[in-house]
Amino acid sequence: MTELSTESELFVATARAFLDKTAAISAQRELHAQGRSYDPAWWNRAAELGWAGLLVPEELGGGSVSASGLHDLAAIAEASGRTVGPGPLYPVSTVLAGLIDADNADAHAESIAALVAGEQVGTWAADEPGRAFRPHAPSATATATTKAAGTGYRLNGVKDRVEAGAQADLILVGARTDDGALQQFLIRSDAPGVTVRPQTCIDLVKQYARIEFDDVEAEVVVGTAAQTAALIDRQTQVGIALACAESVGILDAVLALTIEWCRDRYSFGRPLASYQALKHRLADMTMWLHAARAITAGAVDKIAARTPDAGMWASAAKSYLGEHAGLLVQECIQLHGGIGVTWEHDLHVYLRRITLYRNLLGTPGEHHQAIFTAANSTEPAA
């Protein structure tokens, strides 16, 4: 997203070569035909390349190429967008963002190591049925129980639209305790009382699930109640950064594909790109792409630096991409004519992912409201 060092450029080039070889759009079509989200062996190889551990400090088994793991991770997300890549990069990264910042991170060292190595998959269950994205106000409850080993909890509630919910080994869940405190728990997906119900998704390979928790024993607490809101802020910001970076990669690929088409396709004896009206449309879309890349780069910088206004920058990037990304891809489809709306053409694959990401982690309208609230508040942006 920003100017990369020589080491980072090599890292990203390796990632692109890996994606081109193993995760081209034809591979996504094959996964879709098989009803699969991704190949676990493929994710293991991606983890071996260091993708899963970029946010994790070396003492916990991770490590980044540059001085900023988030910048490296955003570059990987952008590269993945060019092929509409599969895999649980977003859910694993958001879970790790919470675990490594928790006051009790050392207690989660085993889980962190398994996620970094690609041996396990984690996901953040933040959405709830019929509600806007409000991770700070869950309806799920955690009732305290007393045991010989100490205080535990019984978790009850339903989480919705959980990415890789059916593939995850670990689920990060937010709930309200008896005293009204906000707390996060790390739950095993095979724990008694956990029911996973797959949901239909517009994307070819992304899979989501509704997860029900019925008196689930919750003993692995993530951080203290006092820091939980800050952890959720961080997880949200990291998730938004990755979704926006991947969207920029998608827009870059789609616009390049369309410009090439307009140069090669002739109408009335002239290339489409020679018509002034179409030049103006291509120029507008190029402007949207550059603006999307710039606002995303700014958000990644702020989130990586943990500035007080990082949340507002994340909302600005998310709302801009939400408003313009889908419009850009639809414009490109129109410029392709009839072939652009066929199953055989790849444009709809890109559009599906962009459409999915529009409402992920909050709609443009919700982020506009967040920007307004932050700009008119004396408190730091949430």
Image (cartoon, rainbow, N blue to C red):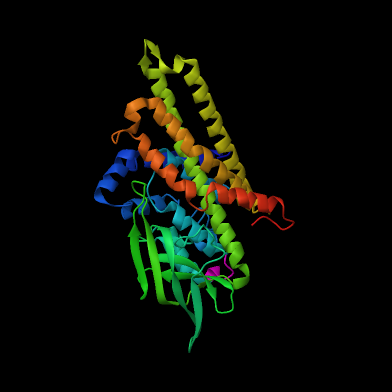
Which of 289/73 is in front?
A: 289
Which of 119/138 is in front?
A: 138
Asked if one can make out residue 215 in the rendered structure from this viewpoint, the answer is: yes
For the point 47% across and 45% down, the residue is 77
- Quadrant in which the N terminus is drawn: top right
Tell me where the magenta segment starts and ends, as one range: 102-106
Find the residue positioned furthest to the bottom: 148
Which of 240/135 is in front?
A: 135
Find the residue positioned furthest to the front: 130
For the point 45% across and 68% down, the residue is 110
Q: Measured from the top left, where is residue 119 in percent x and y?
A: 37, 61
For the point 48% across and 86% down, the residue is 149
For the point 52% across and 67% down, the residue is 138
Q: Measured from the top left, where is residue 24 in percent x and y?
A: 34, 39
Q: Measured from the top left, where is residue 136 in percent x and y?
A: 57, 64
As drawn, 382 above or below 8: below
Q: Residue 224's quadrant in the figure?
A: bottom right
Q: Main secondary structure of the magenta part?
A: loop
Asked if one can make out residue 84 in the rendered structure from this viewpoint, the answer is: no
| Apparent side of residue 372 relative to residue 173 in the rendered image (left or right) | right
